[in-house]
Image: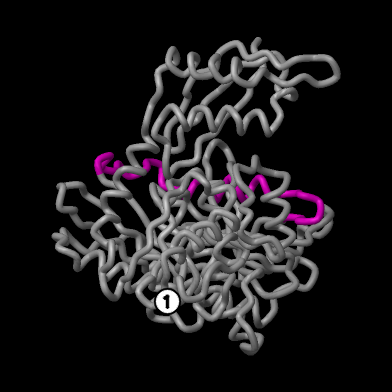
């Protein structure tokens, strides 16, 4: 089940990004500040009152040369489609403007809960002026100061009230996967080809309220899959697909909901920076990953072509050395029949549990091969290791000093564990913890 999503909307210069950064950086416990968007961060994941959620800053979405009012309108539409809760931000210094009224009228038509935050209320004397904002028809205005971090707790308290109290129960036997990648890598063609390759389509399900369509199907072996369509937004697709940042955000949402992610590359065009950004998010999110090179039928090949392309992938995606690679063609259906089996295997690897006794034998053997490192005369001591989670497999290693577990030795232990157990396609996490 995906995290609930909060979207921040409002006209320019009311402090949306300041509020976003304040929420993402200080007032909540950040679970992940996604590496996907580095210059204009628009998506983060955090926690408030024990509830994890995603947050979107629509101010970071550039809609090109659209007129001023049109930009505001499109961003409000994005929020209404993507969010579970919307925070509308206005400025307490400037009062209500025509642009504020435009946004408010749009949000009134939405079925989503809307919380009105009046920003730049930096001192108690300004609080008397916020009551004018009742005229927007969005309920109680909450005075906040993004620059000082005042009042945000009240806004987040109200937001959490609107999150669904009970997560939907999901069939544990169903494997959820999505296809991500740049436009024109052939995601839609692959989806159609997968569904048409001797599959029994069970149903077309309105997977979320965000205009994305989830499709469930059963493979030849009887395994049930739920394919998450990242396209969505068909009614206004041209507007949204024109911005890379928006497509990044949609991919992040799909990754969030998936067990396994198919990272689709275009064999004709090779690897681009966008591919690495999105794949990095899937890796950090701990999802199973399968690298799918599409349009392989269009490439002129010799005996070394596939090996050279694979070497290039391993060079550009060093952190995905555990992810299997498959070369396919949606057009000719080359190797497509292998995809369900590979997805199922990766899902099994994600859920693999290792007994503590066997795990500790592997750790002790690893230490015998490569003794633990020392720092300033102090040697790392590993006392015990145990698996604490799956999806992804997560191991806690109890040590004398956490700081002595250098990245290189952590990586060495990971490699030894991978040699002993079938963790292909899934990241694994090793967490050093000081023994009490």
For mark 1, give the secondary structure: loop
Task: Indicate the position of residue 59 as horizontal and vertical percent values.
Answer: 66, 70
Q: Which residue sits at x=51%, y=75%?
A: 269
Which is more toward the observer, 236 or 257? Answer: 257
Location of residue 227 in the rendering, given as x and y in whole percent from the top left corner? 31, 58
Residue 108 lies, in percent from the top left, at 49, 71
Residue nearer the viewer, 390 or 265? 265
Query: On the rendered structure, is 317 left or right of 19?
Result: left
Residue in view at x 38 percent, y 78 percent: 298
Magenta span: helix, strand or loop, mainly? Answer: loop
Query: In the rendered structure, does residue 160 fall within the stretch colored magenta?
Result: yes
Q: With 95 as the anchor, is 253 left or right in this view?
A: left
Compared with 152, 387 (above or below) is above
Front residue (pair 230, 28):
230
Q: Which residue is painted at 41% across and 57% down in the image?
A: 262
Q: Is residue 13 above or below residue 257?
A: below
212 with respect to 48 (left or right): left
Would you place residue 422 above or below residue 367 in this image?
below
Q: Which residues are magenta?
A: 144-173
Which residue position holds label 1?
300
Q: Report crowding for label 1: few under 14, some 14 to 19, many 20 or more residues within 10 A (C-alpha).
A: few
Is residue 180 found inside the magenta-colored segment of the image? no
Mark yes or no: residue 107 visible: no
Numbered marks: total = 1
- Residue at position x 50%, y 63% from top? 309
For the C terminus, the quadrant is top right
Rendered image quadrant of residue 326: bottom left
């Amino acid at each position: 089940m995906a995290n609930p999503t909060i979207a921040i909307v409002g006209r320019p210069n009311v402090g949306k990004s300041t509020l976003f950064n304040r929420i993402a950086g200080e007032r909540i416990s950040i679970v992940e500040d996604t590496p996907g968007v580095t210059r204009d961060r628009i998506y983060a994941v955090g926690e408030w009152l024990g509830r994890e959620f995603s947050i979107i800053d629509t101010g970071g979405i550039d809609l090109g040369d659209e007129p001023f009012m049109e930009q505001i309108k499109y961003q409000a539409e994005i929020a209404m489609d993507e969010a579970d809760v919307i925070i509308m931000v206005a400025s307490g210094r400037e009062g209500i403007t025509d642009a504020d009224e435009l946004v408010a009228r749009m949000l009134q038509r939405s079925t989503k809960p809307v919380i009105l935050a009046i920003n730049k209320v930096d001192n108690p004397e300004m609080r008397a002026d916020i009551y004018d904002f009742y005229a927007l028809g969005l309920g109680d205005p909450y005075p906040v100061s993004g620059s000082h971090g005042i009042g945000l707790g009240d806004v987040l308290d109200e937001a959490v009230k609107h999150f669904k109290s009970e997560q939907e129960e999901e069939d544990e036997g169903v494997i959820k996967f999505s296809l991500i990648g740049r436009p024109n890598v052939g995601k839609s063609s692959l989806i159609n080809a997968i569904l048409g390759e001797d599959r029994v389509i069970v149903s077309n399900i309105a997977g979320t309220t965000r205009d994305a369509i989830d499709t469930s199907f059963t493979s030849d072996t009887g395994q049930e899959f739920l394919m998450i369509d990242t396209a969505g937004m068909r009614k206004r697709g041209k507007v949204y697909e024109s911005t890379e940042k928006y497509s990044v955000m949609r991919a992040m949402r799909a990754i969030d909901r998936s067990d396994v992610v198919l990272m689709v590359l275009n064999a004709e065009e090779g690897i681009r920076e966008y591919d690495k950004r999105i794949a990095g998010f899937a890796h950090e999110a701990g999802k199973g990953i399968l690298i799918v090179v599409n349009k392989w039928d269009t490439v002129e090949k010799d005996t070394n072509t596939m090996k050279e392309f694979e070497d290039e992938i391993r060079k550009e995606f060093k952190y995905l050395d555990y992810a299997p690679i498959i070369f396919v063609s949606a057009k000719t259906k080359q190797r497509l029949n292998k995809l369900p089996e590979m997805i199922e295997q990766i899902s099994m690897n994600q859920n693999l549990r290792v007994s503590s006794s066997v795990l500790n034998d592997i750790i002790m053997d690893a230490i015998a091969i490569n003794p633990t490192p020392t720092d300033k005369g102090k040697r790392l001591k590993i006392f015990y290791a145990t698996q604490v989670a799956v999806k992804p497999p997560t191991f806690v290693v109890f040590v004398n000093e956490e700081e002595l577990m250098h990245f290189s030795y952590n990586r060495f232990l990971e490699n030894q564990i991978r040699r002993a157990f079938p963790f292909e396609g899934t990241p694994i996490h090793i967490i050093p913890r000081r023994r009490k």
